[in-house]
Image (tube, rainbow, N blue to C red):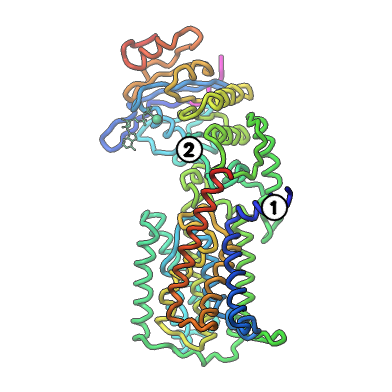
């Protein structure tokens, strides 16, 4: 039996009077890649924002390795080992790759008044990580994010999540607006993440992409999870599509 | 090849434009009037430079974090008035009056910061309101009359802050050292320290910074406090040097300071800032003010030049930016 990493229990979220989540239960196991699917407005982003501490939950509980955690802020989530990667907002485009990788956790050298960031070490580790996540071109770690492509930015964000040993990496539509090669890159990173023992929640509208990397598919519709145990090996893209649109109740 | 890439790297730096402008300015003024480079003129220029310069340095960090402060000019006027009133009325000895003035300056910054971060009101509106409140307080407190400052002649504190001495034929005020010191410290903070990374991230993408656990609000509040305290210190220094604490002094300084900072290459919308650029920007505007008088342009025309410099520099920065982004 796989060990449980995250359990969300009876999660409800209201935006004013709008109910975006009505009692969602969801679990993610260790080293498991979960695909979260659903039509526009199904509540996927809302659910992962709750899990990553970006928005307050209305009611419900979140357990990490069996221990209840109150996600009052993104810091709480990061401390609990949950890292979220959004398409654009995760990086500071003005800052270099290295400075972004270590933002909020800058290594320091020196002491007292002369304490400063260990920029050398930051650049060194950054170069290493860039190679690891497969940015093949020789991009120096001092390059500002503004000069990177969308896929390279994803790679930087993923590298950061992997470096800081996040247990769960959440990717909300990471392949949006990406070209063929860059999309392949992102999918490779996700596979790599599992290999090194990380779990992922992968949200995408392209079901083919999801099928290529995930172990299990969860489908949401109008604020609820309708199916949470689709095995992509024993299912088809068409069958999952029918569940998403509500034509079928299950595959 | 190597030289070319070095030149390109130089060209890509935001400080490049301001540096060229400064050199051009010095060459033109010296060519027209060689007295421009006389020791006496240089020390005069530097004297005025540091007071606005201190504020500009702090403003650079604040603007890099994505905010700015319009109340610095009124704090510059108000805090020395407060200090000298306390001292003249024999409420406090000079040292404590000084500490009180700087402390009140910092508190003004704290209020600015709290309004901006907690109530999420744009800093333009918050600090505009604060400008009026502080200026009004200074005028009301003094009924509009300057406070005398000569009662403290020879006090160690005034000597420490603005005492003057000669190096050869250069007359140097101690405040020049405070400016250089502040520039070094703030350069270190912005570029080398963890806090500097947070400042840039707060201005560049506050949400991303927050998501990494950076306390954006706290960072901004500290910078508002730094900015106001610097304005208070600059005001006190100025009042000692000119032997007058005028409740109206500092009027319009906020715009000149912001102009110095953006001319230097710091971005008004935050994310990127340069202390070296600000030092250049400070010198550019101060030398311009001094130079045009020296070469015989009526001082009243000063604003025309400043405005043109701002517009020209902004055009240059945006051109360089686009060139850079298009990869050439
Ligand atoms: N800030 C908000 N205020 C009010 N309602 C919101 C807010 N954010 C989302 N909603 C509503 O909550 C519901 C779920 O939205 P959510 O963004 O979670 O959907 P999603 O599954 O991520 O959709 P998409 O695939 O389009 O990204 C929608 O009906 C949406 O209109
Ligand atoms: Mg969404």
Q: For the C terminus of chain B, which image quadrant?
A: top right
Query: Image point 39% across, 38% down: which residue?
Result: A56
Please determine if labels 1 and 2 lie on a single subunit. no
Query: Image point 48% across, 19% down: which residue?
Result: A210
Find residue A149 and report its image quarter: top right
Q: Is mark 2 within 8 Å of ligand 2?
A: no
Query: Image point 47% across, 71% down: which residue?
Result: B306
Marks 1/2: CA distance? Answer: 32 Å
Q: Residue B6 carries which label?
A: 1
Q: Which chain carries label 2?
A: A
Q: Is residue A25 above or below residue A166?
A: above
**How many marks overall?**
2
Q: Nearer the viewer, residue A219 or A142?
A: A142
Find residue A197 and report its image quarter: top right
Q: Which mark is residue A234?
A: none
Q: Name the residue under label 2.
A: A88
Residue bounds of the magenta highlight: A1-6
Q: How crowded is mark 1: few (under 14 residues within 10 Å), some or many (20 or more)?
A: few
Q: Residue furthest front?
A: B32
Instruction: Point out residue A134 in the picture as x, y percentages from the top left corner.
Output: 64, 29
Q: Which of A228 and A89 is in front in this view?
A: A89
């Amino acid at each position: 039996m796989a060990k449980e990493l995250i359990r969300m229990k009876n999660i409800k979220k209201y935006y004013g009077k709008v109910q975006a989540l009505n009692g969602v239960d969801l679990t993610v196991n260790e080293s498991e890649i979960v695909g979260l699917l659903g039509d526009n407005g199904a509540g996927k982003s809302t659910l992962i924002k709750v899990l990553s501490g970006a928005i307050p939950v209305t009611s419900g509980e979140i357990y990490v390795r069996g221990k209840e955690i109150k996600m009052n802020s993104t810091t709480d989530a990061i401390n609990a080992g949950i890292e979220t990667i959004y398409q654009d907002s995760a990086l500071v485009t003005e800052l270099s790759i290295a400075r972004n990788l270590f933002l909020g956790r800058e290594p320091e050298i020196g002491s007292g008044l002369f304490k400063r960031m260990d920029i050398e070490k930051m650049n060194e580790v950054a170069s290493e990580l860039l190679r690891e996540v497969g940015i093949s071109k020789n991009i120096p770690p001092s390059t500002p994010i503004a000069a990177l492509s969308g896929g390279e930015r994803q790679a930087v964000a993923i590298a950061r999540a992997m470096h800081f040993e996040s247990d769960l990496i959440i990717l909300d539509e990471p392949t949006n607006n990406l070209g063929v090669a860059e999309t392949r890159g992102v999918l490779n990173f996700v596979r790599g993440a599992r290999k090194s023992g990380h779990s992922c929640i992968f949200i995408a509208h392209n079901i083919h992409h999801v099928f290529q990397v995930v172990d299990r598919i969860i489908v949401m519709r109008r604020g609820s999870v309708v199916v949470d145990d689709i095995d992509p090996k024993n299912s088809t893209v068409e069958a999952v599509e029918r569940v998403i649109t509500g034509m079928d109740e299950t595959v | 090849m190597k030289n070319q890439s070095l030149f390109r790297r130089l060209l890509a730096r935001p400080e490049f434009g301001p540096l060229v402008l400064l050199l051009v300015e010095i060459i033109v003024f010296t060519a027209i009037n060689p007295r421009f480079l006389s020791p006496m003129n240089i020390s005069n220029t530097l004297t005025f430079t540091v007071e606005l310069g201190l504020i500009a340095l702090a403003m650079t960090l604040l603007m890099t974090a994505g905010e700015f402060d319009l109340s610095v000019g009124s704090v510059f006027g108000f805090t020395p008035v407060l200090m000298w009133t306390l001292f003249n009325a024999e409420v406090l000895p000079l040292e404590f009056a000084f500490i009180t003035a700087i402390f009140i300056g910092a508190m003004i910054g704290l209020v600015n910061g709290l309004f901006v971060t907690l109530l999420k009101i744009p800093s333009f509106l918050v600090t505009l309101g604060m400008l009026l409140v502080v200026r009004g307080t200074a005028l009301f407190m003094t009924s509009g009359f300057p406070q005398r400052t000569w009662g403290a002649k020879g006090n160690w504190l005034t000597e420490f802050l603005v005492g003057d001495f000669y190096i050869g034929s250069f007359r140097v005020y101690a405040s020049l050292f405070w400016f250089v010191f502040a520039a070094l410290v703030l350069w270190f903070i912005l570029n080398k320290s963890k806090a500097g990374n947070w400042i840039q991230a707060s201005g560049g993408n506050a949400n991303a910074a927050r998501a990494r656990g950076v306390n954006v609000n706290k960072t901004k509040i500290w910078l508002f406090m730094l900015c106001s305290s610097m304005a208070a210190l600059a005001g006190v220094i100025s009042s000692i040097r000119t032997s007058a604490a005028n409740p109206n002094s500092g009027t319009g300084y906020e715009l000149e300071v912001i102009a110095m900072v953006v001319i230097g290459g710091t971005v008004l919308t935050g994310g990127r800032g340069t202390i070296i650029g600000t030092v250049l920007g400070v010198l550019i505007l101060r030398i311009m003010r001094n130079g045009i008088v020296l070469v015989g342009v009526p001082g009243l025309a000063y604003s025309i030049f400043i405005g043109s410099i701002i517009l020209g520099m902004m055009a240059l920065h945006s051109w360089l930016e686009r060139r850079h982004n298009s990869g050439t």
